Image: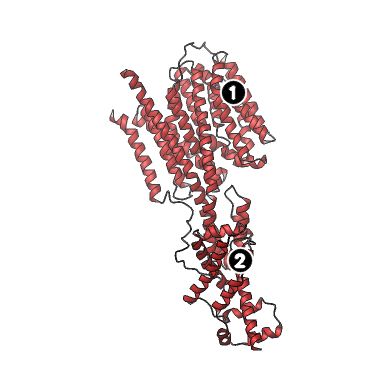
Amino acid sequence: MRRAVAPLLAVTVALVLADSAVVTLALPDILLHLDTTVSQVAWVLISFNLVLGLVAVPTAWAFTRTQPRILSALGIAVFAGASAWCAVAPSIEVLILARCVQALGGALALLGCLELLVAEYGERRGVAAWVTAGVVGTATGPVVGGLLTEAISWQAIFVVQVPIAVLAVPAALAVRMAPAPTDRHRPALLPNLTLALLSAALTAALFLLVLLLVDGWGRSAATAAITVSVVPLAALAAGPLARLLRPSEGVETAVGCFLVAGGLVGLAIPPSAHLAWTIAPQALVGLGLGLTVDRLTARAMHLRLPRVEHAGWTIGARHVGVMVGLAILTPVFTADLQDAQVPAQEAITSLVLDAPLPAQDKVTLARALGDELTDQRGQVPDLHRAFAAADLAPSSRPAADALERDLDSQLERAATRAFRDSFLLGGALALLALVSSLAGLAAPRVRRAA
Amino acid sequence: MNVRVLGLPAVATALVGGVLAVQVAYGGGSFEPLRPADPCAARTVVSHSEGIEALTERLVLIAVDRAACRLDVTREAFLLDVADGGTRTDAEIDALREGLHDAVRQMKTDGSLPPASDLVDEALDSADLNGFLEAVIRALPDSAIDAALETDDVLDRAIDDLDLRALLGDLDAQADLEARVEVAVGEAVKDSLVARVQGLV
């Protein structure tokens, strides 16, 4: 049992940070199951990040005044209870409320686990385990959530968290703590700022890519989950690459930001809607994530006391960054998706008019397509129903099938175009993180020179 | 020192540059919806229908291009606007009527306007005529029909008689325009023939 304590705490950290984006691929299912609206269902994602971002630092202050193992155990128990509540939520309002409670418990669990891991492993290894668990959780959240949703249901995402968290409660209580030092240091501004900007950029990579794959290109949640698993896999390759080239810490984070920016530009300009075109850009994003997030978090906390408070700043910075990313990117891509309707409709009209079909079949198809487009205004329509329902002559079917493929391609093109500016904006956020990272590199030299 | 400072940036620059170069080389950045063609530019209009349906489809496709060109919009934007319903402006009605007349002239010039005799059987099939009158018309030789009726005259009359405002105000879909014009053309062919036959009698 004793040897399971630290791994259980690390898994809890990964669980809490995975929850930041774990529901991304489940949102369409939640929308249908709880009979809600797109804007409301987005709050299932937003509420968790918002609460976690806002309460991280105040929670850390609480840890400097109380027994960490008690607060940690309480936080993990609240997290487990709220996860179970999420799974049985009968309405969207209850689910959002449960997610807020889950984030409150999650903040206590996250920061408490840091202190407990340090008590178990020592300062250096404990912080490293906490940081690594967080990166793994962040990177794998959408993948795991998508696979669970497709294989079982969206509720399964929350159900599987309960037993792990329940086991972590006695693990937290079992840790023996030494009294913490009483020194205080100011928060590390530039690493936290870089972390916030990078988190905003990574939101574009994970959140928007999932939306593009599922809603824009019509892929299943499982396909999207497998596709975005490139990011965590590439993040794993970042460590060996850094060990091979042995860059300085500053160079590593700056290069990481550059790779994330490059990956986002790549995602903005795929040559087609084939999934293969997302792999290399995602690999760049994953490499960048692997080179930056753990380094920046460690740098923001390095030798700063109270440790838990500075960890709180990193959590706050990351989740405020996610919120900033969502706040900036969501209106842009929503407006672009709206604007994409006109060129998509014009392209569809053009192809139907010029299709090698008898005029009467064109009339039939135009009516069915018009109905489909009207019914699905605001979302990317499924044109197959219009073609399946149209009463066409058998001799017209081959041409109609070719037309359907052409129209689907036009929709994919319109959706891809609609996401372009958001991905580029994400790339710009990553470049801002690069600037902030370079400023962080210059700052110590200025101080040394002075 | 150099490897520590430049190694990773060089690898990252090569990776990002390589990925973006391959994507651009394969058309990245131009994966966009089809842009509508200039309605004022010449367009080859082909129909996969037969008889009056083919004639009407070609007429309407050419007419919509010409009308859109006059209104300085694309033909797709014009058709989507028309299909959306609402009140049509005089400019739109005039542009479409002129477009239809232009289409007749273009088809006559390029020799793609069928002789009236090609349209007679189909027009009579859908007409509710006195049996005797129908039999007389069907018995007329093609040369007599073509001598009595110029297709472009018939079409121009049909276009002038069309209540385009009512027609455009009641469309279910953009392609409905063709169906409505087709009915009007069929009617015009039939009415012209009946008038000629009655004149002879």
Q: Which residue is drawn at 67% across and 39% down?
A: A34
Q: Which residue position is annotated with label 2?
A: B164
User: Residue B115: where, in percent of width, then height?
Assistant: 54, 80
Position of residue B18 relative to residue A99, above or below, is below
- Asked whether the viewer can see residue A217, the reply is yes
CA distance separating discs 2 and 1: 75 Å
Image depth: mark 2 or mark 1 in front: 2
Picture layout, residue B110 above or below residue A324 = below
User: Could one spot residue A219 in this view of the protein?
Assistant: no
Apparent side of residue A55 relative to residue A446 in the rendered image (left or right): right
Instruction: Tell me the quarter of the picture where residue A352 sits.
Output: bottom right
Residue count near mark 1 (Cα–Cα under 10 Å), binned few <14, some 14–19, many ≥20? many
Front in this rendered view, residue A230 or A362: A362
User: Which amino acid type is shown beneath numbered disc 1?
Assistant: Ala
- Quarter of the image containing the C terminus of chain A? top left
Residue beneath label 1, please? A168
Give the SS element for disc 1: helix
